[in-house]
């Protein structure tokens, strides 16, 4: 990868790993779990070659706490894992939000609940967006849909984490992690953030700093929580990201996140060929979620079909955004093989018929 | 010859010092702190303190802030 | 006259301990700060703190601190040290934090031979929550969750961490000390210093288990509690240096 502008054929997991290196990630801590193990494998050699930090941790619990330790000194650090093991990290994510630390976590989703299996799924929407940790906190969640986006959003994850001092989850899935696509690394496109006002570097020529979430005084804890939520308001204003295709004249909008976006784009084309005015809407940041834009589209009377590989986790958020202004339907499969384009098309056709019948 | 300085605002009246002083120069006083516990006092009218600092080393609250010898 | 004792510089000015009367935490923290002062490492030290009575450490010491979730101090210390190998990194935990909920993190930091210093206060009970049975509770000891005393059938045996750590290749120094008397306090300080020196010379992890009192939950006066340490506790937890890979060590 000598020339960063060259297109290379690369697997999603390796793309994320190399992007982390390019972004200046100083330390990687991880524990193997399919389907993301290649990230740790790649970085074990790369980080040692570059003289950076690498630990194959004793557990995911330890791994994410090592990240907390590393980022508390102001450096970029990350861990990666998958679904059931990310569940183990929820405690630390709550701490990282309370501590306001720039933790970066890559979750290459697999099937659940419990051990589930190693085939891909999108069942961690709730775990990522709503979190499984204690207390009120918010995490930035970005969902890539191509290997190129795995690179772009890994860069972005590090940038946003440090810009806002908030944990960021890059929510990929087993499909993306394991597939190969041409992609271009380019250079890390963001400015470096100055962490010197809070990072722990030893109390040299200044008072000692302590980073903690402990709140023995109620009013102070209220202040802390309000600061975190105010910060997230700013993140919502500045960083909410989505993409949409042919929504202007659409009657029905297919909505998906992550790699399912690929199939709804294809399904939209087929539907258009069949004379159905379909559009596509894809939230890129799942948190902050593009509630406002969905509400606008719903206000224009456009119906939504949410396509996802879970039992309707994002569906609830779309419904919340639409708020009764139009119809929202779910097309889903819990886990496993991605819904095929033809399956989506026929499901949408059925929904159109049902909606049409209901309207006469 | 030695002397010690007691910061009564740090003292929690555990009385470890009273049992540690080899010359028995630290005693429970009649004065109470804000918790109502009897504070300790250092009384050395005959100049017996040897400044061994054992009281300070065993005080869990660093209430004996200085020892001089 | 010459001043022979003063409050260590690494103790935050005007900070006052919030521990119960007679609690040995105060002595342990003072010794830690005396060592930091003597080694001249205050401005390059970073501490990963713990949960329990030790949680307020950052209110007392003038050293950069990162809060760790319960038991994760040595994982965070690992992260800090790997990110900044030139810093002096240490943890200060209770027995519940180190030997129970955080046992995996503690042992693996030693297996990896992390160049950090780990201090564990052993007061045989969970102090902050009111004196429950913990990993280090002695046989027969009565606590709020071992009302008839620790017995083999329901509770098993106490964890002896200093001996365990000494068996690990990555652990360069392991000692058990007590704070019940002046000679023991002096030995404790020497041990803490050694545990930092093995980190500074890059040999491996330095560990000190500090036998400590919990007069409140033991329902004893501070002096009675110290008598228990020297007569009873040392039988289960013998004092001594179990491993010392530093020059001149054993």
Image (cartoon, coloured by chain):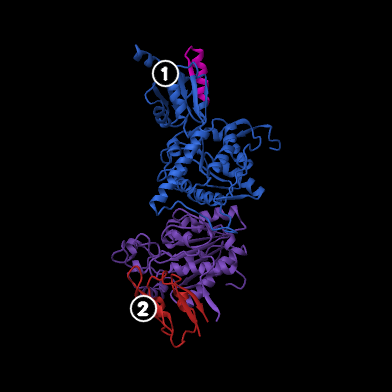
Chain colours: A blue, B red, C purple
Report the residue marked by disc 2.
Answer: B28
Residue C204 position (above or below residue A70): below
Residue C69 position (above or below residue C174): above
Classify 10 Å Cα crowding around label 1: few (below 14), some (14-19), many (20 and above): some
Compare residues A142 and A162 and report the one nearer the observer. A162
Q: Chain of mark 2?
A: B
Residue C236 position (above or below residue A359): below
Report the residue marked by disc 1.
Answer: A301
Residue A268, image x, y percentages? 50, 19
Does the image show residue A278? yes
Residue at (37% x, 73% y) in the render? B13
The answer to whether A194 appears left or right of A320 in the picture is: right
Does the image show residue A306? no
Compare residues C54 and A295 and report the one nearer the observer. A295
Q: Chain of mark 1?
A: A
Let me know if residue A272 is in the magenta part. Answer: yes
Q: Quadrant of residue A12?
A: top right
Label 2 close to label 1 by CB (< 8 Å): no
Secondary structure beneath disc 2? strand
> Which-is-in-front pick, marks 2 and 1?
2
Residue A322, image x, y percentages? 40, 25
Classify 10 Å Cα crowding around label 2: few (below 14), some (14-19), many (20 and above): some
Q: Quadrant of the N terminus of chain C?
A: bottom right
Disc 2 to disc 1, C-alpha distance: 83 Å
Let me know if residue B26 is in the magenta part. Answer: no
Bounds of the magenta segment: A262-278
The answer to whether A182 appears left or right of A260 in the picture is: right
Residue A253, image x, y percentages? 46, 21
Q: Quadrant of the C terminus of chain C?
A: bottom right
Q: Residue furthest bottom?
A: B46
Q: Main secondary structure of the magenta part?
A: helix
């Amino acid at each position: 990868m000598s020339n960063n502008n060259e297109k290379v054929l690369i697997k999603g997991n390796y793309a994320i790993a190399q992007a982390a290196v390019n972004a200046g990630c100083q330390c990687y801590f991880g524990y193997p779990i399919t389907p993301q193990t290649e990230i740790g494998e790649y970085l074990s050699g790369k980080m040692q070659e570059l003289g950076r930090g690498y630990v194959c941790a004793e557990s995911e619990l330890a791994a994410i706490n090592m990240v907390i330790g590393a980022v508390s000194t102001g450096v970029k650090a990350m861990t990666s894992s998958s679904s059931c093991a990310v569940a183990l990290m929820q405690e630390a994510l709550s701490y990282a939000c309370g501590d306001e630390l720039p933790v970066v976590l890559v979750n290459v989703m697999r099937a659940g609940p419990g051990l589930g299996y190693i085939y891909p799924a999108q069942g961690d929407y709730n775990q990522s967006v709503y979190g499984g940790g204690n207390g009120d906190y918010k995490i930035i969640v970005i969902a890539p849909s191509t290997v190129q986006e795995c690179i772009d959003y890994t860069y972005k994850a590090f940038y946003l984490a440090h810009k806002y001092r908030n944990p960021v989850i890059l929510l990929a899935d087993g499909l993306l992690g394991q597939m190969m696509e041409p992609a271009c690394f380019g250079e890390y496109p963001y400015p470096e953030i100055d962490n010197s006002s809070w990072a722990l570097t030893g109390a040299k020529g200044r008072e000692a700093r302590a980073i903690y979430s402990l709140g023995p005084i109620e009013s102070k804890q209220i202040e802390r929580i309000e600061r975190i939520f105010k910060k997230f308001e700013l993140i919502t204003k500045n960083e909410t990201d989505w993409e949409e295709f042919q929504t202007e004249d659409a009657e029905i909008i297919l909505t998906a996140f992550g790699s399912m976006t690929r199939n709804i784009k294809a399904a939209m084309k087929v539907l258009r060929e069949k004379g159905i005015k379909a559009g596509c809407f894809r939230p890129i940041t799942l948190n902050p979620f593009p509630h406002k834009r969905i509400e606008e589209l719903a206000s224009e009377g456009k119906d939504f079909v949410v396509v996802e590989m879970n039992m309707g986790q994002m569906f609830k958020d779309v419904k919340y955004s639409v708020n009764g202004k139009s119809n929202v339907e779910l097309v889903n499969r819990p886990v496993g093989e991605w819904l095929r384009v033809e399956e989506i098309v026929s499901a949408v056709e059925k929904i159109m018929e049902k909606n049409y019948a209901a309207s006469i | 010859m030695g002397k010690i300085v007691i910061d009564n605002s740090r003292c929690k009246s555990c009385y470890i010092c009273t049992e540690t002083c080899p010359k028995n120069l630290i005693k429970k006083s009649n004065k109470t702190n804000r918790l109502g516990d009897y504070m300790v006092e250092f009384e050395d009218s005959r100049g017996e303190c040897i400044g061994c600092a054992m009281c300070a080393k065993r005080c869990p609250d660093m209430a004996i802030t200085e020892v001089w010898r | 006259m010459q001043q022979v004792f003063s409050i260590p510089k690494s103790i935050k000015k005007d900070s006052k301990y919030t521990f119960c009367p007679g609690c040995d935490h105060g002595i342990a923290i003072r010794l830690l700060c005396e060592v930091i002062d003597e080694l001249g490492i205050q401005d390059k030290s970073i501490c990963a703190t713990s949960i329990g009575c030790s949680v307020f450490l950052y209110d007392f010491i003038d050293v950069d601190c990162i809060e760790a979730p319960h038991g994760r101090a040595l994982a965070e210390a690992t992260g800090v040290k790997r990110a900044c190998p030139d810093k002096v990194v240490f943890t200060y935990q209770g027995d519940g934090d180190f030997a129970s909920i955080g046992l995996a993190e503690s042992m693996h930091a030693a297996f990896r031979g992390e160049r950090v210093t780990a201090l564990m206060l052993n007061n045989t009970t969970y102090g902050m929550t009111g004196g429950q049975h913990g990993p280090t509770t002695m046989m027969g000891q009565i606590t709020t969750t071992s009302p008839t005393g620790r017995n083999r059938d329901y509770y098993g045996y106490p964890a002896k961490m200093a001996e365990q750590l000494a068996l690990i290749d990555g652990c360069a120094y392991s000692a058990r000390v007590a704070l019940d008397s002046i000679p023991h306090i002096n030995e404790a300080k020497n041990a803490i210093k050694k545990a930092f020196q093995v980190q500074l010379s890059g040999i491996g992890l330095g560990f000190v288990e500090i036998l400590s009192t919990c007069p409140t939950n033991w329902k004893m006066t501070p002096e009675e509690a110290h008598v228990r340490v020297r007569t009873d506790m040392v039988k289960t937890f013998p004092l001594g240096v179990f491993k010392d890979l530093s020059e001149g060590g054993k």
